[in-house]
Amino acid sequence: MNFYDELAWRGLIQDTVNETESFMKSKPFAAYIGFDPTAASLHLGNFQQITLLQRLQISGNRPIALMGGATGRVGDPTGKSEERNLLSIDEINHNIACIEKQLSKFIEFGKERNQAVLVNNYDWFSSFSFLDFIRDVGKHITVSYMMSKDSVQNRLESGLSYTEFTYQLIQGYDFYHLHKHYDCHVQLGGSDQWGNITTGVELIRRLSNQKAYALTSPLILRSDGSKFGKSATGENVWLDPKMTSSYKFYQFILNRTDEEAQNLIKRFSFKSKEEILSLIEHHLAEPHLRVLQRNLAEELTIAVHSKEALILAQKASGILFDKNAQVEWNAFDIEFLNEVFEGVPRFPMAKSELDTPIDIVDFLVQKTKIYKSNNEARRFIQDNALKINKNNTTLETKVSKEHIILDKYIWIAQGKKNHYLVELT
């Protein structure tokens, strides 16, 4: 399947300029996507753009990944209600180095025809004087044209600095530069970038009297309308394992709604059309099995982290969510386990108090104060509702140092949803 048709059935086409489809189907081409270095890692919301570069390469076309070393110094007003804080040059350069390393996991860079090219727009803007830019570039785009863009209109009431106002012109020049020096005829991006992208198409037409093309993809939104890639706490789900663990990443995908999962597996998965449609059919027949969520969580965790990280994430998920899972506590370190137990109430206790085994009711009431009364603790134990480190308990159970996990914790589970962590000092 050619690149355009591949995007079409996956629901990845929202807007195109005239003749983009016929151009994409006529011959191999180069296309670029820009990445702003606002953080040291890309996040899951950027993953759609990464897969577009991958699909470009797989289909025999040349992907160009542009690092916004210059535009990152300005700040894109698109989708922002207020002006962002500008980063220092050192921060931007650090972020670019990190993102370059991330992208190399997904696309192959090199000099062959369909190998990817990585460029930094600071390389051509650093020697471009302000006067030269407004004379040679600015005169070709009118103020009324720039004012008509949604990214400008949406910020007029809250305030838009001249710095951010010029962003579309700078991004437009990026497209012109890549068209001139890299034979790049297509820019890809999210639908919110349509105004910036078409400025580039127009600039190429006016400066070189040539045709350029553009295609945007629908933004990924969650079922509640919020931006995709943020956790329940509002934090980004990063692609850097140091910033978002494989466990949190895996759980985020696993917890998508059925509607989100059907949308995401088409956009993110590299399974064939036949495989995906078969999975959707299976899911619709037995939605309680969450076939789409599990398949997508496994594929993306392997792609972003690794096969080994997926296994670890699945083992960690089994701690809280699979009553039959056998837990290999030594497979985890303290930091990873802390993420699994994030939000679980913690109760401090001196480790020395376990020098002598303690009756379980005393442990739960007197030593840790998890429960307020002996009767309450006894009731949960007698109802077989209480476990220590996933092991059943009785009124005869004695808690000892043998119950300590990783020399730090004892985990108490009351039923499926109530968890408590005894933190030993």
Image (spheres, rainbow, N blue to C red):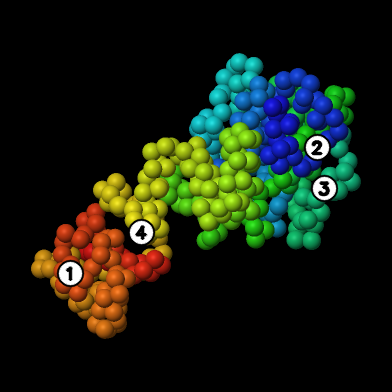
Circle 3 Cα neighbour tier, 10 Å, few/some/many (<14 / 14–19 / ≥20): some
Disc 1 to disc 3, C-alpha distance:
69 Å
Extreme residue in the front direction: 285
The residue lying toward the viewer, choosing from 139 and 313, is 313
- Residue 16 numbered tag: 2
Q: Which kind of residue does numbered mark 1 sit on?
A: Thr
Residue 393 is situated, as x and y percent measured from the top left of the image, at: 23, 68
Which of the two labelled residues, at mark 2 and mark 3, occupies the earlier sequence position? 2
- Residue 397 numbered tag: 1
53 sits to left or right of 300: right
Q: Callout 4: helix, strand or loop?
A: loop
Q: What residue sits 78% from the left and 56% below the top? A: 154
Q: Which kind of residue does numbered mark 2 sit on?
A: Thr
Disc 2 to disc 4, C-alpha distance:
50 Å
| Image quarter hosting the N terminus | top right
The answer to whether residue 120 is visible is no
